[in-house]
Amino acid sequence: MRPQLRWLKVVVVALCVLTGTACAQYALDGRAVSMRYDPFRVAGLPATDGPSGPRGPLPESTDRVQNSDGGVIDRAALLAIEDIEDFWARHYAETFAGGFAPVQTLISIDPSDPGTAPVCGAEAAMLKYNAAYCRTRDIMVWDREFLLPVAQKFFGDMSVNGLMAHEYGHAVQLQARLVDADTPTLVSEQQADCLAGTYLRWVAEGSSERYTLNTTGALDRVIAGAIAMRDPISLFNLLSSPTDAHGTALDRVSALQQGFDVGADACAAMTLDEIEHRRGGLPSLLFHSGIPGSDAPIDESTLGSLMDTLDAVFTPAAPPVLSVDQTGCPLPEGLPAGYCPDTNTVSVNLGLLQQIGTPADESEQVLLQGDNTALSAVASRYVLAVQQERGVDLRSGVAGMRTACLTGVAQREMAQRSGLPLTLGTGDLDEAVSGILTNGLVASDVDAGVVPSGFTRISAFRSGLLGDADDCFRRFP
């Protein structure tokens, strides 16, 4: 949150909602909405909560994998790769010319083993917490000691498939001649995210013989893994062109969503212009690495500035009031912020709000958070007052989607409009997107009923980032 920008850290640790923390959810309310924006669907598929992961045992042998220790991690990686290859063998020709050829060489490494030979010109130690596809030699390599075990522990079994599908996406894009040596990294990486999304939808539809994937918690964990691999903001990145970056959390999630929702045709169409279009004309500062700094403190003064900012953005006839001691608007236990229609009050539990607004590190067991994780949650409660003034229902799945959309509108204005008490800076959108996954409050109704799927929650938020308040009310009537 400017003027106090902060350093973002890459965090691959547990998420509250994604690891089972209870969140209120809705019963179906019978409203007719677009399939894409239905709170109980995920890009047209039902929002399901059930088993996810391998349907049967892992392979007994890892003979195909060079340097393997034969352990469970390599067997999980190999099963995922076999499934991804099955998908592309069946569907490659639907979009791309020619036939699909599997990657020739698979290599597993232990980056901590000094005896491990270099792969594709890189020392093993450089591949710690990494997986890669070497296009000059048609080699796929992964770190079995650090990357995959951590991903599996914190993001679930299907996170291994997500990682492997991304790297296999690089092989597919090369075969399909979507990239060459001059393709910007930003484009090739988001194409790979998109191609991974096409595979994940196939699994979610029940077409895989090896895996199942529910479209709520399990898919959310895969998305969280994509966020964890976002580009960190560092001074080193200032030395590189923005087109050499992999993309922010919002970039990478929206690219994966393109593949999941639209299919491989959308991946083939990705260019720098398409990425800029997907960013909706928002300031480049939000997407490019900048000089790191500190978060704004989550205190009464900052929250007061946020309320003044939202008053200027939405200009309601009767602006809601802020209560930091819950006077006139008590909150249920565990809820950091809420809205009371009867008193037109946005109420906060300052202690809980500070917890989710404190910059994350590896010891805190959260994915990613910062001041805008907390401030976007408060903004979501403010926009319930905007909805009440319009006379719409505040208790439904559609209300949760509308709330996320209007919060996106607020974030857009805070990024674009000069002279506001609070404005967005580098990394702030990543903080908001992560919060939408981890606690879901931004996409909830007045009773804190959360839209079941993080995929759908982010879609609603992004629709507001790319539009205005009237669009939100039209889209989510």
Image (cartoon, rainbow, N blue to C red):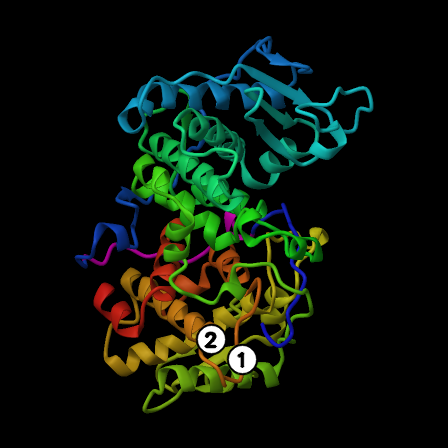
Dominant secondary structure of the residues highlighted in magenta in the image: loop
- What residue sits 51% from the left and 43% below the top? 184
Amino acid type of the residue tagged 2 in the rendering:
Met
Which part of the image, by quadrant, shows the C terminus?
Answer: bottom left
Which part of the image, by quadrant, shows the N terminus?
Answer: bottom right
Residue 439, percent from left and from top: 50, 58
Q: Is residue 126 magenta?
A: no
Q: Is residue 442 visible?
A: yes
Query: In the displayed structure, would residue 38 be above or below residue 190?
Result: below
Quadrant in the picture for residue 96: top left
Query: In the displayed structure, would residue 237 be above or below residue 181?
Result: below
- Direction from residue 227 to residue 470 in the image, left or right: left
> Is the residue marked by circle 1 packed among few (<14), some (14-19), or many (20+) residues within 10 Å?
many
Quadrant in the picture for residue 259: top left
**Which is more toward the observer, 105 or 147?**
105
**Which is more toward the observer, 144 or 192?**
192
- Direction from residue 221 to residue 397 in the image, left or right: left
Q: Which residues are magenta?
A: 16-30
**Which is more toward the observer, 235 or 218?**
235
* Residue situated furthest front in the rendering: 182
Q: Earlier in the sequence, mark 2 or mark 1?
A: 2
Amino acid type of the residue tagged 1 in the rendering:
Leu
Residue 151, percent from left and from top: 60, 37
Task: Report helix, strand or loop for mark 1.
Answer: loop
**Image disc number at residue 201:** none
How far is mark 2 from mark 1, CA to CA?
7 Å
> Is the residue marked by circle 2 packed among few (<14), some (14-19), or many (20+) residues within 10 Å?
many
Q: Do the CB atoms of the residues marked 2 and 1 lie less than 8 Å apart? A: yes
In the picture of the structure, the residue carrying the numbered disc 1 is: 422
In the picture of the structure, the residue carrying the numbered disc 2 is: 414
